Amino acid sequence: QVQLVESGGGLVQPGGSLRLSCAASGFAFSRYTMMWVRQAPGKGLEWVSSINGAGQNPRYADSVKGRFTISRDAAKDTLYLQMNSLKPEDTAVYFCEQAGGSRGQGTQVTVSS
């Protein structure tokens, strides 16, 4: 079955960086657009970024544009999110999601001094 396992979250100071990873299995990874979504405390899910199956056409929410970079490694069936210049408002649980399909369990990112 489809499995998506996120890692790389943690506590970081404002202005810091983190790199999230999402290990995928159980489906043809390179055939699917993949995305990152997040959920801040007390708020709904927010789309953050997406990338097509070929690793092209990355898209970003305005709130993260210029600070976050999405990428994928077809050989490792892994999705990444490089997050730079982190702000307290980026604090959330980050999930990777298969377009039209499954979502992982999430990884907590906390930006605080």
Image (cartoon, rainbow, N blue to C red):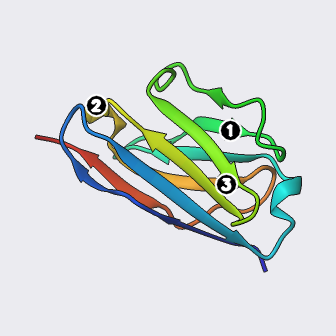
Image position, residue 111 (x, y; %): 24, 42
The residue where tag 2 is placed is: 87
Q: Quadrant of residue 85?
A: top left
Q: Amino acid at mark 2?
A: Lys
Q: Amino acid at mark 3?
A: Glu
| For marks 1 and 3 on the same chain, the one whose residue lies earlier in the sequence | 1
Task: Determine whether label 2 and label 3 are within 8 Å by CB.
Answer: no
At a point 20% along the width and 34% down the height, the residue shown is 14
Q: Amino acid at mark 1?
A: Ser
Q: Secondary structure at mark 1?
A: strand
The residue where tag 3 is placed is: 97
- Could you tell me how far apart the alpha carbons at marks 2 and 3 are, in whole angstroms? 23 Å
Camera-side mark, 1 or 3: 1
Image position, residue 98 (x, y; %): 74, 55
- Neighbor class of circle 1 (other Cα within 10 Å; few <14, some 14-19, many 20+) is many
| For marks 2 and 3 on the same chain, the one whose residue lies earlier in the sequence | 2
- Neighbor class of circle 3 (other Cα within 10 Å; few <14, some 14-19, many 20+) is many
**Foreground of the two, 40 or 1:** 1
| For marks 2 and 1 on the same chain, the one whose residue lies earlier in the sequence | 1
- Could you tell me how far apart the alpha carbons at marks 2 and 1 are, in whole angstroms? 20 Å
Q: Is residue 8 left or right of residue 73?
A: left
- Could you tell me how far apart the alpha carbons at marks 1 and 3 are, in whole angstroms? 9 Å
Q: Is residue 99 left or right of residue 17?
A: right
Against 45, is 97 above or below?
A: below
Q: Secondary structure at mark 3?
A: strand
Which numbered disc covers residue 50?
1
- Neighbor class of circle 2 (other Cα within 10 Å; few <14, some 14-19, many 20+) is some
At a point 57% along the width and 25% down the height, the residue shown is 61
Image position, residue 50 (x, y; %): 68, 38
Which image quarter is the C terminus in?
top left
